[in-house]
Amino acid sequence: MRTTRPILFLDFDDVICLNQPYGGYDVLNAFSQASRDGTPINAKDALWPRLFNKRATQYLQQVNEEFAPNYVLSTSWRWFFERDQLAQTLELAGLSFVAQNLHQDWTTPQISRDAQRAVEIRRWLSNHPESANAWVALDDELSGTGFSTWPWDKQNFVVLCQEGVGLQDPEYQCLREAFALRIGSQDRSR
Protein backbone atom coordinates (compact mmCIF):
# COMPACT_ATOMS: atom_id res chain seq x y z
CA MET A 1 0.00 0.00 0.00
CA ARG A 2 1.29 3.46 -0.94
CA THR A 3 2.03 5.83 1.88
CA THR A 4 2.26 8.95 -0.29
CA ARG A 5 0.30 9.77 -3.41
CA PRO A 6 2.68 10.30 -6.28
CA ILE A 7 3.24 13.80 -7.60
CA LEU A 8 3.09 14.68 -11.27
CA PHE A 9 4.89 17.91 -12.14
CA LEU A 10 2.89 19.05 -15.17
CA ASP A 11 3.91 21.49 -17.86
CA PHE A 12 1.30 22.69 -20.39
CA ASP A 13 3.00 24.07 -23.51
CA ASP A 14 4.28 21.39 -25.89
CA VAL A 15 2.94 18.74 -23.52
CA ILE A 16 -0.85 19.08 -23.51
CA CYS A 17 -1.21 22.50 -25.19
CA LEU A 18 0.26 22.61 -28.68
CA ASN A 19 -0.96 26.17 -29.35
CA GLN A 20 -2.90 24.90 -32.36
CA PRO A 21 -5.28 26.64 -32.73
CA TYR A 22 -5.36 28.06 -29.17
CA GLY A 23 -2.87 28.62 -26.39
CA GLY A 24 -2.24 30.44 -23.16
CA TYR A 25 -2.58 33.92 -24.65
CA ASP A 26 -6.06 33.03 -25.87
CA VAL A 27 -6.99 31.99 -22.34
CA LEU A 28 -5.50 35.20 -20.97
CA ASN A 29 -7.55 37.20 -23.49
CA ALA A 30 -10.73 35.31 -22.52
CA PHE A 31 -10.22 36.12 -18.83
CA SER A 32 -9.31 39.75 -19.61
CA GLN A 33 -12.36 40.19 -21.84
CA ALA A 34 -14.69 38.68 -19.22
CA SER A 35 -13.19 40.98 -16.59
CA ARG A 36 -13.56 44.06 -18.81
CA ASP A 37 -17.17 43.12 -19.67
CA GLY A 38 -18.02 42.15 -16.11
CA THR A 39 -19.30 38.79 -17.36
CA PRO A 40 -18.43 35.20 -16.49
CA ILE A 41 -16.18 33.13 -18.71
CA ASN A 42 -18.21 31.65 -21.56
CA ALA A 43 -18.07 27.88 -21.07
CA LYS A 44 -19.44 27.40 -24.62
CA ASP A 45 -16.59 29.36 -26.22
CA ALA A 46 -14.84 27.38 -29.00
CA LEU A 47 -11.56 27.93 -27.13
CA TRP A 48 -12.13 25.40 -24.36
CA PRO A 49 -12.61 22.09 -26.21
CA ARG A 50 -9.69 22.93 -28.52
CA LEU A 51 -7.21 24.37 -26.03
CA PHE A 52 -5.54 21.11 -25.05
CA ASN A 53 -4.59 18.38 -27.49
CA LYS A 54 -7.26 15.70 -27.34
CA ARG A 55 -4.88 12.72 -27.60
CA ALA A 56 -2.54 14.18 -24.95
CA THR A 57 -5.43 14.74 -22.55
CA GLN A 58 -6.62 11.16 -23.10
CA TYR A 59 -3.17 9.85 -22.17
CA LEU A 60 -3.07 12.12 -19.13
CA GLN A 61 -6.49 10.91 -18.04
CA GLN A 62 -5.36 7.29 -18.36
CA VAL A 63 -2.34 8.04 -16.16
CA ASN A 64 -4.67 9.72 -13.67
CA GLU A 65 -6.99 6.71 -13.56
CA GLU A 66 -4.13 4.25 -13.13
CA PHE A 67 -1.88 6.10 -10.68
CA ALA A 68 -4.07 8.82 -9.05
CA PRO A 69 -1.33 11.45 -8.72
CA ASN A 70 -1.52 14.85 -7.12
CA TYR A 71 -0.57 17.54 -9.61
CA VAL A 72 1.92 20.34 -9.20
CA LEU A 73 1.91 22.79 -12.09
CA SER A 74 5.35 23.59 -13.44
CA THR A 75 4.05 25.50 -16.44
CA SER A 76 4.94 29.07 -17.35
CA TRP A 77 1.18 29.75 -17.27
CA ARG A 78 1.44 30.14 -13.49
CA TRP A 79 3.15 33.50 -14.10
CA PHE A 80 -0.02 34.88 -15.69
CA PHE A 81 -2.89 33.18 -13.88
CA GLU A 82 -4.05 32.75 -10.30
CA ARG A 83 -4.82 29.28 -9.00
CA ASP A 84 -8.59 29.71 -9.43
CA GLN A 85 -8.14 30.82 -13.04
CA LEU A 86 -5.94 27.84 -13.85
CA ALA A 87 -8.37 25.49 -12.13
CA GLN A 88 -11.24 27.01 -14.10
CA THR A 89 -9.24 26.68 -17.32
CA LEU A 90 -8.56 23.02 -16.59
CA GLU A 91 -12.24 22.40 -15.82
CA LEU A 92 -13.50 24.15 -18.96
CA ALA A 93 -10.94 22.43 -21.18
CA GLY A 94 -11.81 18.91 -19.99
CA LEU A 95 -9.13 18.34 -17.38
CA SER A 96 -11.23 18.60 -14.25
CA PHE A 97 -9.37 15.61 -12.79
CA VAL A 98 -6.20 17.74 -12.73
CA ALA A 99 -7.98 20.71 -11.15
CA GLN A 100 -9.55 18.45 -8.51
CA ASN A 101 -6.22 16.85 -7.63
CA LEU A 102 -3.95 19.87 -7.40
CA HIS A 103 -1.55 19.49 -4.50
CA GLN A 104 -2.06 21.98 -1.68
CA ASP A 105 1.27 23.51 -2.73
CA TRP A 106 0.03 23.48 -6.32
CA THR A 107 2.91 25.10 -8.21
CA THR A 108 6.66 24.98 -8.37
CA PRO A 109 8.36 28.08 -6.94
CA GLN A 110 8.50 31.06 -9.26
CA ILE A 111 12.20 31.82 -8.99
CA SER A 112 12.60 33.86 -12.18
CA ARG A 113 11.16 33.63 -15.67
CA ASP A 114 14.39 32.22 -17.02
CA ALA A 115 14.94 29.70 -14.22
CA GLN A 116 15.26 26.13 -15.36
CA ARG A 117 12.30 23.90 -14.64
CA ALA A 118 14.62 21.37 -13.02
CA VAL A 119 15.73 23.99 -10.48
CA GLU A 120 12.12 24.86 -9.61
CA ILE A 121 11.18 21.21 -9.19
CA ARG A 122 14.25 20.55 -7.04
CA ARG A 123 13.28 23.52 -4.83
CA TRP A 124 9.67 22.25 -4.52
CA LEU A 125 10.95 18.80 -3.56
CA SER A 126 13.30 20.26 -0.93
CA ASN A 127 10.21 21.84 0.66
CA HIS A 128 8.34 18.52 0.50
CA PRO A 129 10.75 15.76 1.55
CA GLU A 130 7.81 13.35 1.92
CA SER A 131 7.58 13.36 -1.91
CA ALA A 132 11.30 12.95 -2.59
CA ASN A 133 10.77 9.43 -3.94
CA ALA A 134 7.23 9.80 -5.19
CA TRP A 135 7.37 12.20 -8.13
CA VAL A 136 7.39 12.16 -11.92
CA ALA A 137 7.89 15.21 -14.17
CA LEU A 138 6.17 15.69 -17.54
CA ASP A 139 7.71 18.51 -19.54
CA ASP A 140 8.86 19.41 -23.03
CA GLU A 141 12.37 19.11 -24.44
CA LEU A 142 13.08 22.85 -24.39
CA SER A 143 11.87 23.57 -20.84
CA GLY A 144 13.35 20.30 -19.62
CA THR A 145 16.94 20.86 -20.72
CA GLY A 146 18.08 21.35 -17.11
CA PHE A 147 17.15 17.79 -16.19
CA SER A 148 20.16 16.48 -18.11
CA THR A 149 22.38 17.56 -15.19
CA TRP A 150 20.42 15.44 -12.71
CA PRO A 151 21.76 12.06 -11.60
CA TRP A 152 20.75 9.27 -13.95
CA ASP A 153 18.53 7.59 -11.35
CA LYS A 154 16.44 10.80 -11.14
CA GLN A 155 16.31 11.28 -14.92
CA ASN A 156 14.32 8.03 -15.12
CA PHE A 157 11.38 9.95 -13.65
CA VAL A 158 11.46 12.82 -16.15
CA VAL A 159 9.46 12.40 -19.35
CA LEU A 160 10.09 14.98 -22.05
CA CYS A 161 7.73 15.59 -24.95
CA GLN A 162 8.77 16.72 -28.38
CA GLU A 163 7.98 20.37 -29.10
CA GLY A 164 4.94 20.79 -31.32
CA VAL A 165 3.97 17.14 -30.79
CA GLY A 166 3.26 16.86 -27.06
CA LEU A 167 2.26 13.84 -25.02
CA GLN A 168 1.86 10.90 -27.38
CA ASP A 169 2.13 7.14 -27.02
CA PRO A 170 5.93 6.85 -26.51
CA GLU A 171 5.88 9.48 -23.74
CA TYR A 172 2.73 7.95 -22.27
CA GLN A 173 4.47 4.57 -22.02
CA CYS A 174 7.51 6.21 -20.37
CA LEU A 175 5.21 8.03 -17.96
CA ARG A 176 3.49 4.77 -16.96
CA GLU A 177 6.88 3.09 -16.46
CA ALA A 178 8.10 5.97 -14.29
CA PHE A 179 4.99 5.82 -12.09
CA ALA A 180 5.22 2.03 -11.87
CA LEU A 181 8.85 2.35 -10.71
CA ARG A 182 7.83 4.90 -8.09
CA ILE A 183 5.01 2.74 -6.78
CA GLY A 184 7.21 -0.34 -6.79
CA SER A 185 9.94 1.44 -4.81
CA GLN A 186 7.35 2.61 -2.24
CA ASP A 187 6.06 -0.95 -1.86
CA ARG A 188 9.61 -2.30 -1.38
CA SER A 189 10.40 0.31 1.27
CA ARG A 190 7.54 -0.79 3.55
Image (cartoon, rainbow, N blue to C red):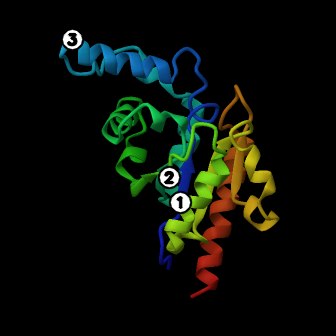
Could you tell me which secondary element the residue under label 1 belongs to?
Answer: helix
Tell which tag, 3 or 2, sits nearer the viewer. 3
Q: Where is mark 3, residue-wise?
A: 37
Label 3 to label 1: alpha-carbon separation: 37 Å
Amino acid on which the number 3 mark rests in the picture: Asp
Find residue 38 and report its horizontal and vertical position in percent: 18, 16
Mark 3, Cα crowd under 10 Å, few <14 / some 14-19 / many 20+, is few
Image-quadrant location for residue 182: bottom right
Find residue 63 and report its horizontal and vertical position in percent: 55, 52
Q: Earlier in the sequence, mark 3 or mark 1?
A: 3
Find residue 55 and report its horizontal and vertical position in percent: 59, 32
Please, is residue 157 above or below residue 50 in the view? below
Left or right: residue 147 compared with residue 29: right
Q: Earlier in the sequence, mark 1 or mark 2?
A: 2
Could you tell me which secondary element the residue under label 2 belongs to?
Answer: helix
Amino acid on which the number 2 mark rests in the picture: Asn
Residue 124 is labelled as 1
Residue furthest to the left: 38
Amino acid on which the number 1 mark rests in the picture: Trp
Residue drawn 63% across the image and 44% down it: 115
Mark 2, Cα crowd under 10 Å, few <14 / some 14-19 / many 20+, is some
Between residue 19 and residue 80, name the one nearer to us.
80
Left or right: residue 176 compared with residue 70: right
Residue drawn 40% across the image and 46% down it: 97
Please, is residue 154 above or below residue 33 in the view? below
Label pair 1/2, CB-CB below 8 angstroms: no
Question: The C terminus lies in which quarter of the figure?
Answer: bottom right
Q: Where is mark 2, residue-wise?
A: 64
Please, is residue 76 above or below residue 9 in the view? above
